[in-house]
Each structure stands twice: as structure tokens, then as C-alpha cells.
Image (cartoon, rainbow, N blue to C red):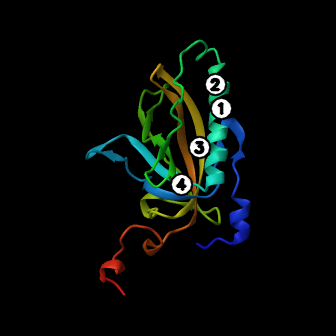
Amino acid sequence: MNTTNTDNEKYSTIKKINRGRIVTPVGKAYWAYLDKPEEFNGQPTNNYSIQVEFTKEGTQALKSELLRVLEEAKQAPKFSGKPWKKEPNISLKEGKDNSVRFKFASKVSYIDHTTHEEKPINIQLFNSKGDRLKPSDTPIPVGSKVRICFKPVPYHINRNNNGIRLQLEALLLLEEAINEDTHYPSASSYGLTD
């Protein structure tokens, strides 16, 4: 799945689509849990998730858009008058190397309000041609080029726990990384393969 410079230029900006959803620019994937729940301290979290690192320009554009959405949400009756942190959570982590990764997540299931049954949520995964892929058959290696469709969901639990969640809806896998292209060891780096 190789992308061309034209594809990279075409996918280099944020795109707003219907129902408040946002499509990110192309980024580098880290720690994708799309076919099974993410684990924390050995325990499943009940979330699918992926972290994505963008260019400096992409990071700034996404941060600006998330802060704009959050400021707009603060005016909604649901949040009006509530105290907000000076720097609300916008689902990003800054690394020691000055890298910035955004975390996109979705619950693995929901309760249907009509039937009261638990129903699975499936993350939609597509290749660069737009063909649907099965997450269970398509691991996303660290460093792969991806684009994310998500819905920003503002939340306010209390004055110290508030911000915006990045609700993962779909992922476009533009180019699968080969482990030698990342900072992580591969079988060939240990001499196990040719």
C-alpha cells in the first residue's frame, strides 16, 4: 500500500464532515487496538484505541480545531457555568522527545436502549483504495500511515476532569510500516530473518 506525493498532499489537512465528525491529516500510528480491547496494567479497558502522531502543522491544526470545538461546547446549556481547567484534556500526550500523540478511542460495545442488549461496536477500517478490511485480519504496525475519522465529544466530570474525547469511528490505512522504518526492533534487527 504505497502512497504517492499527490495522496500525501490530498490527505494533509483536517476535513470536517457531517454530524460533527472530523477527519485528520495523515499521521503515524502507534499502539493500535482495533480488534480487541486495549489493556492497562494487564486488564482490558473496554476500549478500542490508537495513538497517532502528526506533523507539527497537523498537530497544531488539530489542537486548534479541538480547542475551538471545546470553546463552543462550553456555551451549550449542558456545560454553561461549569468551571473548566485552565488546560482541559484534549486527548494528547507529549513525549520526552517533544513528540505529540493524540489518542482516539471507542467503547467495544454499547447497551441498546430499546432491547437493553449489549451490542458490539465495530471500528470501520479501510485500505488506501477504500476497500473495507477486517480489524482482526489487519494488524496496524507501529509507524503505519493512517487517517482517522472521529467525533470530538466534550465532557465535564468535575473542575479537574474535563475536556474532549476523540471518539474513534473509522481508520484509513494508507501505508503499512515495515518495522525497520520505526524505532522498534524487528526480527531482522536480531538476525532472525534475512
> Which quadrant: the N terminus?
bottom right
Q: Position of residue 134 (x, y in %)?
A: 49, 59
Among numbered discs 4 and 3, the one appearing first in the sequence: 4
Is residue 55 positioned above or below 86 on the image?
A: below
In this figure, which residue is indicated by the disc labeled 4?
53
Real-space Cα distance between discs 4 and 1?
20 Å
In this figure, which residue is indicated by the disc labeled 2?
73
Quarter of image, res 192: bottom left
Helix, strand or loop status at disc 3: strand
Real-space Cα distance between discs 3 and 1?
13 Å
In this figure, which residue is indicated by the disc labeled 1?
69
Among numbered discs 4 and 1, the one appearing first in the sequence: 4
The amino acid on which the numbered mark 1 sits, given as a three-letter code, is: Val
State whether residue 121 appears in this view. Answer: no
| Discs 3/1, front | 1
Q: Decide which of 109, 15 is in the foreground and name it.
A: 15
Discs 2, 1 touching: Cβ within 8 Å: yes
Among numbered discs 3 and 2, the one appearing first in the sequence: 2
Real-space Cα distance between discs 4 and 2?
25 Å
Q: Decide which of 161, 151 is in the foreground and name it.
A: 161
Helix, strand or loop status at disc 1: helix
The amino acid on which the numbered mark 4 sits, given as a three-letter code, is: Glu
Q: Residue at x 73, y 61 (%)?
A: 10
Q: Position of residue 77 (x, y in %)?
A: 63, 14
Real-space Cα distance between discs 2 and 1?
6 Å
Q: Residue at x 46, y 55 (%)?
A: 97
Discs 4, 2 touching: Cβ within 8 Å: no
| 11 sits left or right of 147 in the view | right
Q: Position of residue 105 (x, y in %)?
A: 48, 43
Q: Residues within 10 Å of mark 2 (few under 14, many from 20)?
A: some
